[in-house]
Protein backbone atom coordinates (compact mmCIF):
# COMPACT_ATOMS: atom_id res chain seq x y z
CA UNK A 1 0.00 0.00 0.00
CA UNK A 2 1.05 3.58 -0.62
CA UNK A 3 1.03 4.60 3.04
CA UNK A 4 3.22 1.62 3.97
CA UNK A 5 5.76 2.62 1.32
CA UNK A 6 5.73 6.21 2.62
CA UNK A 7 6.28 4.92 6.16
CA UNK A 8 9.26 2.85 5.02
CA UNK A 9 10.76 5.81 3.16
CA UNK A 10 10.26 8.19 6.08
CA UNK A 11 13.67 9.05 7.52
CA UNK A 12 12.16 9.49 10.99
CA UNK A 13 11.47 5.73 11.05
CA UNK A 14 14.89 4.57 9.90
CA UNK A 15 16.40 1.84 12.14
CA UNK A 16 19.23 4.19 13.16
CA UNK A 17 16.84 6.88 14.42
CA UNK A 18 14.61 4.35 16.19
CA UNK A 19 17.65 2.85 17.94
CA UNK A 20 18.75 6.28 19.15
CA UNK A 21 15.24 7.14 20.37
CA UNK A 22 14.94 3.83 22.25
CA UNK A 23 18.24 4.51 23.99
CA UNK A 24 17.14 8.06 24.82
CA UNK A 25 13.80 6.93 26.26
CA UNK A 26 15.11 4.03 28.36
CA UNK A 27 18.18 5.85 29.73
CA UNK A 28 16.07 8.86 30.71
CA UNK A 29 13.51 6.49 32.25
CA UNK A 30 16.25 4.93 34.40
CA UNK A 31 17.85 8.26 35.28
CA UNK A 32 14.53 9.88 36.16
CA UNK A 33 13.52 6.93 38.32
CA UNK A 34 16.84 7.01 40.18
CA UNK A 35 17.32 10.73 40.67
CA UNK A 36 13.75 11.87 41.26
CA UNK A 37 12.11 8.93 43.04
CA UNK A 38 14.50 6.32 44.40
CA UNK A 39 17.70 8.02 45.58
CA UNK A 40 16.33 10.91 47.68
CA UNK A 41 14.00 8.63 49.68
CA UNK A 42 16.25 5.55 49.65
CA UNK A 43 19.28 7.46 50.92
CA UNK A 44 17.24 9.30 53.57
CA UNK A 45 15.17 6.43 54.99
CA UNK A 46 17.29 3.33 54.32
CA UNK A 47 20.84 4.69 54.45
CA UNK A 48 20.20 7.58 56.87
CA UNK A 49 22.03 10.15 54.73
CA UNK A 50 21.76 13.87 55.44
CA UNK A 51 20.29 16.33 52.94
CA UNK A 52 23.81 17.64 52.32
CA UNK A 53 25.07 14.18 51.31
CA UNK A 54 22.01 13.59 49.14
CA UNK A 55 22.54 16.97 47.45
CA UNK A 56 26.16 16.20 46.63
CA UNK A 57 25.21 12.75 45.36
CA UNK A 58 22.69 14.16 42.90
CA UNK A 59 25.01 17.04 41.94
CA UNK A 60 27.77 14.56 41.04
CA UNK A 61 25.55 13.14 38.30
CA UNK A 62 24.82 16.42 36.56
CA UNK A 63 28.36 17.77 36.83
CA UNK A 64 29.75 14.54 35.35
CA UNK A 65 27.20 14.71 32.54
CA UNK A 66 27.88 18.32 31.63
CA UNK A 67 31.68 18.50 31.74
CA UNK A 68 32.08 15.63 29.27
CA UNK A 69 29.61 16.81 26.62
CA UNK A 70 32.10 18.82 24.53
CA UNK A 71 34.83 16.11 24.41
CA UNK A 72 32.14 13.50 23.75
CA UNK A 73 31.06 15.46 20.67
CA UNK A 74 34.64 15.36 19.38
CA UNK A 75 34.79 11.60 20.02
CA UNK A 76 31.55 11.07 18.05
CA UNK A 77 33.05 12.82 15.02
CA UNK A 78 36.22 10.71 15.24
CA UNK A 79 35.01 7.28 16.37
CA UNK A 80 31.35 7.11 15.36
CA UNK A 81 28.19 6.33 17.28
CA UNK A 82 28.60 2.72 18.39
CA UNK A 83 31.88 3.14 20.27
CA UNK A 84 30.80 6.41 21.90
CA UNK A 85 27.28 5.39 22.90
CA UNK A 86 28.21 1.84 23.90
CA UNK A 87 30.90 3.16 26.26
CA UNK A 88 28.37 5.52 27.79
CA UNK A 89 25.62 2.95 28.31
CA UNK A 90 28.10 0.45 29.80
CA UNK A 91 29.20 3.09 32.32
CA UNK A 92 25.54 3.79 33.08
CA UNK A 93 24.94 0.06 33.51
CA UNK A 94 27.84 -0.17 35.99
CA UNK A 95 26.58 2.89 37.86
CA UNK A 96 23.09 1.40 38.34
CA UNK A 97 24.61 -1.86 39.64
CA UNK A 98 26.90 0.07 42.01
CA UNK A 99 24.06 2.21 43.37
CA UNK A 100 21.87 -0.88 43.80
CA UNK A 101 24.48 -2.87 45.74
CA UNK A 102 26.29 -0.33 47.93
CA UNK A 103 25.27 1.18 51.25
CA UNK A 104 28.20 3.57 51.66
CA UNK A 105 27.80 7.25 50.85
CA UNK A 106 31.11 7.58 49.01
CA UNK A 107 30.20 4.77 46.60
CA UNK A 108 26.78 6.33 46.07
CA UNK A 109 28.51 9.54 45.03
CA UNK A 110 30.90 7.56 42.78
CA UNK A 111 27.92 5.73 41.28
CA UNK A 112 26.12 8.99 40.48
CA UNK A 113 29.30 10.46 38.99
CA UNK A 114 29.57 7.36 36.76
CA UNK A 115 25.91 7.86 35.85
CA UNK A 116 26.79 11.39 34.73
CA UNK A 117 29.80 10.24 32.73
CA UNK A 118 27.73 7.45 31.17
CA UNK A 119 24.83 9.67 30.13
CA UNK A 120 27.12 12.40 28.76
CA UNK A 121 27.17 10.85 25.23
CA UNK A 122 23.38 10.55 25.16
CA UNK A 123 22.31 14.00 23.96
CA UNK A 124 25.30 14.66 21.64
CA UNK A 125 24.87 11.23 19.99
CA UNK A 126 21.10 11.40 19.66
CA UNK A 127 20.92 14.99 18.44
CA UNK A 128 23.89 14.63 16.09
CA UNK A 129 22.61 11.40 14.58
CA UNK A 130 18.95 12.34 14.23
CA UNK A 131 19.59 15.79 12.74
CA UNK A 132 22.00 14.26 10.22
CA UNK A 133 19.32 11.83 9.08
CA UNK A 134 16.55 14.45 9.07
CA UNK A 135 18.40 16.86 6.79
CA UNK A 136 17.93 20.63 6.66
CA UNK A 137 14.18 20.48 6.00
CA UNK A 138 13.37 18.25 8.96
CA UNK A 139 15.40 19.65 11.86
CA UNK A 140 12.47 20.97 13.90
CA UNK A 141 10.37 17.84 13.35
CA UNK A 142 13.15 15.47 14.40
CA UNK A 143 13.96 17.61 17.46
CA UNK A 144 10.30 17.38 18.46
CA UNK A 145 10.48 13.58 18.23
CA UNK A 146 13.70 13.53 20.28
CA UNK A 147 12.14 15.69 22.97
CA UNK A 148 9.05 13.49 23.04
CA UNK A 149 11.29 10.48 23.76
CA UNK A 150 13.13 12.48 26.44
CA UNK A 151 9.99 13.87 28.11
CA UNK A 152 8.29 10.47 28.02
CA UNK A 153 11.26 8.78 29.69
CA UNK A 154 11.77 11.53 32.28
CA UNK A 155 8.05 11.62 33.07
CA UNK A 156 7.30 7.89 33.15
CA UNK A 157 10.43 6.83 35.06
CA UNK A 158 9.64 8.52 38.40
CA UNK A 159 5.94 7.55 38.20
CA UNK A 160 6.29 3.92 37.02
CA UNK A 161 9.03 3.03 39.47
CA UNK A 162 6.70 3.78 42.40
CA UNK A 163 4.65 0.70 41.51
CA UNK A 164 7.77 -1.47 41.96
CA UNK A 165 9.10 0.20 45.10
CA UNK A 166 5.93 -0.40 47.09
CA UNK A 167 6.64 -0.47 50.83
CA UNK A 168 10.37 0.24 50.55
CA UNK A 169 10.91 -2.78 48.29
CA UNK A 170 13.89 -1.27 46.49
CA UNK A 171 15.40 -4.57 45.34
CA UNK A 172 12.59 -5.10 42.80
CA UNK A 173 12.95 -1.54 41.52
CA UNK A 174 16.71 -1.91 41.10
CA UNK A 175 16.27 -5.20 39.24
CA UNK A 176 13.88 -3.48 36.84
CA UNK A 177 16.38 -0.70 36.17
CA UNK A 178 19.20 -3.19 35.60
CA UNK A 179 16.95 -5.03 33.13
CA UNK A 180 16.25 -1.75 31.32
CA UNK A 181 19.97 -1.04 31.00
CA UNK A 182 20.53 -4.55 29.60
CA UNK A 183 18.09 -3.69 26.80
CA UNK A 184 19.93 -0.41 26.17
CA UNK A 185 23.31 -2.16 25.83
CA UNK A 186 21.83 -4.56 23.25
CA UNK A 187 20.35 -1.67 21.24
CA UNK A 188 23.64 0.28 21.39
CA UNK A 189 25.42 -2.70 19.79
CA UNK A 190 23.21 -2.16 16.70
CA UNK A 191 24.47 1.40 16.07
CA UNK A 192 26.87 2.18 13.18
CA UNK A 193 30.35 0.75 13.51
CA UNK A 194 33.44 2.46 14.85
CA UNK A 195 34.67 3.86 11.53
CA UNK A 196 31.33 5.01 10.11
CA UNK A 197 29.21 8.10 10.66
CA UNK A 198 25.69 8.35 9.29
CA UNK A 199 25.30 11.24 6.86
CA UNK A 200 22.56 12.41 4.55
CA UNK A 201 23.09 13.53 1.00
CA UNK A 202 21.44 16.56 -0.52
CA UNK A 203 18.20 14.65 -1.14
CA UNK A 204 18.05 13.28 2.40
CA UNK A 205 19.18 9.71 1.58
CA UNK A 206 21.10 8.05 4.38
CA UNK A 207 24.62 7.02 3.51
CA UNK A 208 27.79 5.99 5.34
CA UNK A 209 30.93 8.12 5.33
CA UNK A 210 34.31 7.11 6.72
CA UNK A 211 35.65 9.21 9.56
CA UNK A 212 38.99 10.76 8.71
CA UNK A 213 41.97 9.61 10.70
CA UNK A 214 44.95 11.85 11.41
CA UNK A 215 46.68 9.49 13.79
CA UNK A 216 50.11 10.60 12.70
CA UNK A 217 49.75 13.92 14.54
CA UNK A 218 50.00 14.16 18.36
CA UNK A 219 46.63 13.87 20.11
CA UNK A 220 46.64 17.37 21.62
CA UNK A 221 47.58 18.94 18.29
CA UNK A 222 44.77 17.04 16.57
CA UNK A 223 42.26 18.23 19.17
CA UNK A 224 43.30 21.90 19.01
CA UNK A 225 43.42 21.84 15.20
CA UNK A 226 40.01 20.23 15.08
CA UNK A 227 38.47 22.80 17.44
CA UNK A 228 40.03 25.62 15.42
CA UNK A 229 38.39 24.19 12.31
CA UNK A 230 35.09 24.02 14.17
CA UNK A 231 35.35 27.67 15.17
CA UNK A 232 36.15 28.77 11.63
CA UNK A 233 33.38 26.66 10.10
CA UNK A 234 30.61 28.12 12.28
CA UNK A 235 28.78 31.12 10.90
CA UNK A 236 26.71 32.11 13.91
CA UNK A 237 25.73 35.29 15.69
CA UNK A 238 27.74 35.85 18.91
CA UNK A 239 24.40 36.54 20.61
CA UNK A 240 23.45 32.88 20.21
CA UNK A 241 25.85 31.82 22.97
CA UNK A 242 24.37 33.94 25.81
CA UNK A 243 20.92 33.11 24.43
CA UNK A 244 21.62 29.36 24.77
CA UNK A 245 22.70 29.87 28.36
CA UNK A 246 19.69 32.03 29.23
CA UNK A 247 17.22 29.56 27.71
CA UNK A 248 18.25 26.75 30.07
CA UNK A 249 18.95 29.18 32.92
CA UNK A 250 15.26 30.19 32.85
CA UNK A 251 14.28 26.53 33.09
CA UNK A 252 16.93 25.79 35.74
CA UNK A 253 15.49 28.51 37.98
CA UNK A 254 12.23 26.56 38.20
CA UNK A 255 13.73 23.12 38.83
CA UNK A 256 14.33 23.21 42.62
CA UNK A 257 11.40 25.43 43.63
CA UNK A 258 8.42 23.93 41.81
CA UNK A 259 7.89 21.19 44.40
CA UNK A 260 8.68 23.62 47.22
CA UNK A 261 6.08 26.10 45.94
CA UNK A 262 3.46 23.38 45.45
CA UNK A 263 3.92 21.89 48.92
CA UNK A 264 4.67 24.93 51.10
CA UNK A 265 2.74 27.74 49.41
CA UNK A 266 -0.13 26.09 47.54
CA UNK A 267 -0.41 23.24 50.07
CA UNK A 268 -1.12 20.75 47.28
CA UNK A 269 -1.46 17.04 47.89
CA UNK A 270 0.81 14.67 45.98
CA UNK A 271 -2.09 13.83 43.66
CA UNK A 272 -2.84 17.51 42.96
CA UNK A 273 0.83 18.22 42.27
CA UNK A 274 1.01 15.24 39.92
CA UNK A 275 -2.00 16.61 38.05
CA UNK A 276 -0.23 19.94 37.63
CA UNK A 277 2.83 18.24 36.18
CA UNK A 278 0.68 16.11 33.89
CA UNK A 279 -1.31 19.16 32.73
CA UNK A 280 1.81 21.02 31.62
CA UNK A 281 3.75 18.00 30.36
CA UNK A 282 0.87 16.51 28.40
CA UNK A 283 0.21 19.78 26.56
CA UNK A 284 3.91 20.01 25.66
CA UNK A 285 4.14 16.41 24.42
CA UNK A 286 0.89 16.57 22.42
CA UNK A 287 1.91 19.72 20.53
CA UNK A 288 5.63 19.00 20.03
CA UNK A 289 5.48 17.10 16.74
CA UNK A 290 2.78 19.29 15.11
CA UNK A 291 4.75 22.39 16.10
CA UNK A 292 7.95 20.84 14.73
CA UNK A 293 6.31 20.22 11.37
CA UNK A 294 4.97 23.79 11.28
CA UNK A 295 8.41 25.19 12.13
CA UNK A 296 9.96 23.23 9.25
CA UNK A 297 7.22 24.50 6.93
CA UNK A 298 6.81 28.14 8.03
CA UNK A 299 10.14 29.07 9.61
CA UNK A 300 11.57 29.58 13.09
CA UNK A 301 10.88 33.19 14.09
CA UNK A 302 7.07 33.17 14.54
CA UNK A 303 7.21 30.18 16.86
CA UNK A 304 10.06 31.56 18.94
CA UNK A 305 8.16 34.81 19.47
CA UNK A 306 4.90 33.02 20.34
CA UNK A 307 6.66 30.55 22.66
CA UNK A 308 8.60 33.14 24.63
CA UNK A 309 5.52 35.36 24.97
CA UNK A 310 3.27 32.53 26.18
CA UNK A 311 5.82 31.10 28.63
CA UNK A 312 6.89 34.47 30.02
CA UNK A 313 3.27 35.54 30.55
CA UNK A 314 2.43 32.31 32.38
CA UNK A 315 5.44 32.60 34.70
CA UNK A 316 4.92 36.28 35.51
CA UNK A 317 1.28 35.64 36.45
CA UNK A 318 1.71 32.24 38.09
CA UNK A 319 2.29 33.20 41.73
CA UNK A 320 -0.50 35.81 41.62
CA UNK A 321 -3.25 33.39 40.51
CA UNK A 322 -6.01 33.08 43.10
CA UNK A 323 -7.95 30.03 41.91
CA UNK A 324 -7.07 26.45 41.06
CA UNK A 325 -8.67 26.77 37.62
CA UNK A 326 -6.43 29.75 36.84
CA UNK A 327 -3.37 27.82 38.01
CA UNK A 328 -4.24 24.88 35.77
CA UNK A 329 -4.79 27.26 32.86
CA UNK A 330 -1.40 28.94 33.40
CA UNK A 331 0.35 25.57 33.64
CA UNK A 332 -1.26 24.55 30.33
CA UNK A 333 -0.18 27.87 28.75
CA UNK A 334 3.37 27.29 29.99
CA UNK A 335 3.33 23.80 28.49
CA UNK A 336 2.06 25.16 25.18
CA UNK A 337 4.73 27.87 25.23
CA UNK A 338 7.48 25.28 25.57
CA UNK A 339 5.89 23.22 22.80
CA UNK A 340 6.52 26.28 20.60
CA UNK A 341 10.01 26.96 21.98
CA UNK A 342 11.55 23.47 21.93
CA UNK A 343 11.37 22.64 18.20
CA UNK A 344 11.99 26.20 16.98
CA UNK A 345 14.88 26.85 19.36
CA UNK A 346 16.62 23.57 18.61
CA UNK A 347 16.06 24.03 14.88
CA UNK A 348 17.81 27.40 15.20
CA UNK A 349 20.76 25.82 17.00
CA UNK A 350 20.92 22.87 14.57
CA UNK A 351 20.99 25.30 11.64
CA UNK A 352 24.11 26.96 13.03
CA UNK A 353 26.12 23.73 13.03
CA UNK A 354 28.41 22.75 10.14
CA UNK A 355 27.57 19.17 9.02
CA UNK A 356 31.20 18.04 8.97
CA UNK A 357 31.69 19.05 12.64
CA UNK A 358 28.24 18.17 13.89
CA UNK A 359 29.23 16.08 16.91
CA UNK A 360 31.83 18.44 18.39
CA UNK A 361 29.69 21.56 17.97
CA UNK A 362 26.58 19.91 19.41
CA UNK A 363 28.67 18.83 22.40
CA UNK A 364 29.99 22.37 22.82
CA UNK A 365 26.52 23.90 22.54
CA UNK A 366 25.05 21.38 25.00
CA UNK A 367 27.80 22.27 27.48
CA UNK A 368 26.79 25.95 27.32
CA UNK A 369 23.16 24.99 27.83
CA UNK A 370 24.13 22.68 30.67
CA UNK A 371 25.72 25.58 32.54
CA UNK A 372 22.32 27.22 32.69
CA UNK A 373 20.87 24.11 34.33
CA UNK A 374 23.67 24.13 36.92
CA UNK A 375 23.64 27.84 37.79
CA UNK A 376 19.85 28.31 37.57
CA UNK A 377 18.97 26.16 40.62
CA UNK A 378 21.72 27.80 42.72
CA UNK A 379 20.42 31.29 41.95
CA UNK A 380 16.82 30.17 42.42
CA UNK A 381 17.34 28.85 45.93
CA UNK A 382 19.13 32.02 47.01
CA UNK A 383 16.53 34.47 45.71
CA UNK A 384 13.74 32.32 47.21
CA UNK A 385 15.38 32.66 50.65
CA UNK A 386 16.06 36.39 50.28
CA UNK A 387 13.09 37.74 48.33
CA UNK A 388 10.34 35.14 48.78
CA UNK A 389 8.48 32.70 46.57
CA UNK A 390 7.43 35.23 43.92
CA UNK A 391 11.03 36.04 42.96
CA UNK A 392 12.15 32.85 41.13
CA UNK A 393 9.05 32.78 38.92
CA UNK A 394 9.37 36.49 38.13
CA UNK A 395 13.06 36.10 37.32
CA UNK A 396 12.40 33.14 35.02
CA UNK A 397 9.67 35.10 33.21
CA UNK A 398 11.92 38.16 32.85
CA UNK A 399 14.73 36.01 31.44
CA UNK A 400 12.32 34.72 28.78
CA UNK A 401 11.34 38.32 27.94
CA UNK A 402 15.05 39.11 27.57
CA UNK A 403 15.34 36.11 25.23
CA UNK A 404 12.33 37.37 23.26
CA UNK A 405 14.21 40.62 22.63
CA UNK A 406 17.59 38.96 22.11
CA UNK A 407 16.40 36.56 19.41
CA UNK A 408 15.22 39.52 17.34
CA UNK A 409 18.90 40.37 16.75
CA UNK A 410 19.88 36.82 15.72
CA UNK A 411 19.50 36.57 11.96
CA UNK A 412 17.19 33.72 10.94
CA UNK A 413 16.43 33.13 7.23
CA UNK A 414 12.95 31.94 6.34
CA UNK A 415 13.73 28.21 6.28
CA UNK A 416 15.72 28.35 9.50
CA UNK A 417 19.33 28.47 8.32
CA UNK A 418 21.37 30.96 10.36
CA UNK A 419 23.33 33.37 8.25
Image (cartoon, rainbow, N blue to C red):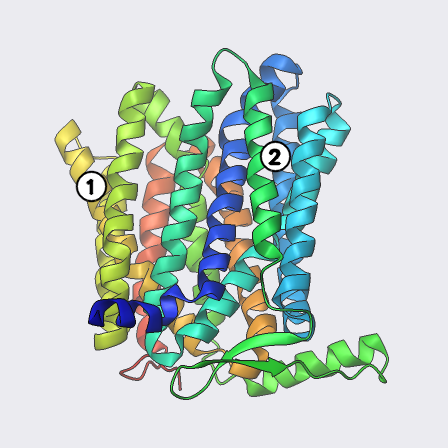
Residue at screen point 36% across, 59% down = 145
Q: Position of residue 132 (x, y in %)?
A: 47, 75
- 95 left or right of 207 in image: right
Q: Please tell me in which quadrant of the rendered image residue 57 appears.
A: top right
Please name whichever residue, 70 or 75, is drawn nearer the observer in this view of the structure.
75
The C terminus lies in which quarter of the figure? bottom left
- Is residue 279 positioned above or below 374 on the image? above
Q: Please tell me whether mark 1 or mark 2 is closer to you in this view.
A: 2
The N terminus lies in which quarter of the figure? bottom left
Q: Please tell me in which quadrant of the rendered image residue 362 appears.
A: bottom right
Residue at mark 2: 178
Q: Position of residue 393 (x, y in %)?
A: 33, 42
Please name whichever residue, 182 or 415, is drawn nearer the observer in this view of the structure.
182
- 239 left or right of 284 in image: right
Residue at screen point 48% across, 21% down = 164
User: Element at badge 1?
Assistant: helix
Residue at mark 1: 330
User: Element at badge 2?
Assistant: helix
> For mark 1, does the 10 Å Cα neighbourhood hold few (<14), some (14 to 19), or many (20 or more) residues?
many
Separation of residues labelled 1 and 2 (CA atoms) = 38 Å
Amino acid sequence: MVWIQKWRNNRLFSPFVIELLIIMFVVEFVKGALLLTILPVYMKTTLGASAFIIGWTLAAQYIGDNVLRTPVGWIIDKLGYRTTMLTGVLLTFVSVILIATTSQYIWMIVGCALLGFGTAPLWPCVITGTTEVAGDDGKATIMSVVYMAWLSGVGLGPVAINFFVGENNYSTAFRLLIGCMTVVVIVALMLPRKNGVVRTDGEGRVEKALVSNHAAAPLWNRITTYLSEVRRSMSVSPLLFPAMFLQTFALGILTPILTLYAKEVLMLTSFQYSMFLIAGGAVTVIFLVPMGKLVDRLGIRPFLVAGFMLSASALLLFTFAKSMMMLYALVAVLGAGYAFIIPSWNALIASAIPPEKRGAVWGFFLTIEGLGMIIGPIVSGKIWDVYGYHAPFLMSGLVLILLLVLQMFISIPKKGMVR
